[in-house]
């Protein structure tokens, strides 16, 4: 399925994000907790789920921004996801880069992740780490170590083109991490401040997609994120590009 992260249009309302996704011909939306559906706001979550479904879309996942290792309450995160009608919750692998983390921190993240994964499993939900800098998933090696150490069946990992890696290294990371990959954050940029049209990344993405699709029997959500200049017209173009790529690679 092809969708969009609501944080891509963080300044737009829930209704506007839904209309953009519908106009783009997408299948789903990942609703984020910072801008659109705050943790514990069940009324907004229920309203968002209804509007999403009325538009013919699904909620792929809930981007909760929960920090593993914090041991904060997770009940409200699960309840919010449930009211959004999604079974997948995205979290962060702590708030320290892997090179800055000692064994005490690693164990703290592991313990908290197992705790919340058990809570999620009771609701038939899954947990997915964002694959991101400044956390324990900031390199392929640390991400794999984390996943192997947790060793819980309902804990997965997103994937995105890591800014610090070459194309060849990114392709290698897909082989290295494929057994855990759930959703994909799709963009083409040098960094957040230097974003390009997705079509300009065709040479790279047409190498990534076959590896993603061949690496796992699990279905993936391909979620557009942070388009060039936050421009809706660019978003529509990127959506068409991604739909064509995924269609041709099936």
Image (cartoon, rainbow, N blue to C red):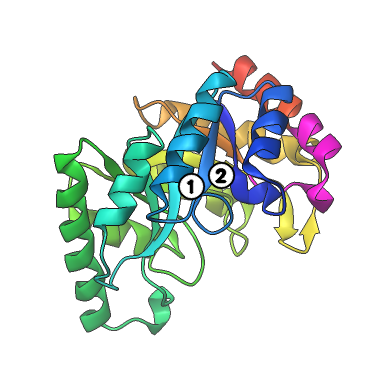
What stretch of residues is rendered in magenta? 225-238
Q: Is residue 233 magenta?
A: yes
Q: Are marks 2 and 1 in contact (CB under 8 Å)?
A: yes
Q: Is residue 156 visible?
A: no
Nearer to us in this view, 31 or 150: 31
Q: Quadrant of residue 198?
A: top right
Q: Main secondary structure of the magenta part?
A: helix
Q: Position of residue 175 (x, y in %)?
A: 41, 42
Residue at screen point 29% across, 73% down: 70
Of the numbered discs in the image, which one, if any, rests on residue 159?
A: 1
Q: Secondary structure at mark 1?
A: strand
For disc 2, the neighbor class at 10 Å (few under 14, some 14 to 19, many from 20) is some
Q: Quadrant of residue 199?
A: top right
For disc 1, the neighbor class at 10 Å (few under 14, some 14 to 19, many from 20) is many
Residue at screen point 26% across, 69% down: 109
Per the model, the C-alpha gap separating discs 2 and 1 is 6 Å
Q: Is residue 3 magenta?
A: no
Of the numbered discs in the image, which one, if any, rests on residue 178?
A: none
Task: Look at the picture and state if 71 lies above or below 167.
Answer: below
Residue at screen point 55% across, 29% down: 51
In the picture of the structure, the residue carrying the numbered disc 2 is: 185
Q: Position of residue 52 (x, y in %)?
A: 54, 28
User: Where's the C terminus, which quadrant?
Assistant: top right
Nearer to us in this view, 182 or 148: 182
Nearer to us in this view, 94 or 163: 94
Lower position in the chain sequence, tag 2 or tag 1: 1
Name the front one of labels 2 and 1: 2
Q: Secondary structure at mark 2?
A: strand
Residue lying at the far front of the rendered structure:
43
Q: Position of residue 225 (x, y in %)?
A: 64, 46
Residue at screen point 14% across, 50% down: 118
Q: Position of residue 47 (x, y in %)?
A: 49, 36
């Amino acid at each position: 399925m092809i969708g969009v992260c609501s944080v891509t249009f963080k300044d737009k309302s829930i209704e506007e994000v839904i209309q953009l996704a519908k106009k783009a011909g997408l299948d789903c939306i990942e609703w984020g907790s910072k801008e659109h559906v705050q943790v514990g706001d069940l009324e907004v979550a229920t309203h968002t789920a209804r509007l999403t479904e009325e538009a013919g879309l699904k909620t792929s996942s809930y981007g909760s921004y929960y920090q593993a290792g914090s041991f904060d309450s997770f009940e409200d995160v699960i309840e919010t996801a449930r009211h959004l009608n999604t079974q997948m919750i995205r979290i962060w692998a702590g708030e320290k880069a892997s090179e800055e983390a000692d064994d005490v921190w690693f164990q703290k993240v592991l313990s908290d992740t197992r705790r919340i994964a058990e809570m999620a499993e009771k609701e038939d939900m899954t947990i997915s780490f964002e694959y991101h800098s400044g956390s324990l998933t900031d390199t392929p090696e640390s991400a794999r170590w984390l996943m192997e150490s947790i060793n819980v069946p309902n804990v997965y990992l997103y994937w995105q083109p890591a800014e610090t890696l070459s194309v060849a290294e990114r392709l290698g990371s897909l082989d290295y991490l494929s057994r855990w990959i759930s959703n994909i954050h799709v963009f083409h940029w040098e960094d957040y401040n230097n974003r390009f049209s997705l079509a300009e990344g065709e040479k790279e993405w047409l190498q990534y997609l076959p590896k993603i699709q061949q690496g796992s029997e699990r279905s993936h959500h391909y979620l557009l994120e942070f388009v060039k200049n936050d421009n809706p017209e660019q978003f529509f173009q990127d959506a068409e590009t991604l739909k064509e790529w995924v269609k041709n690679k099936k």
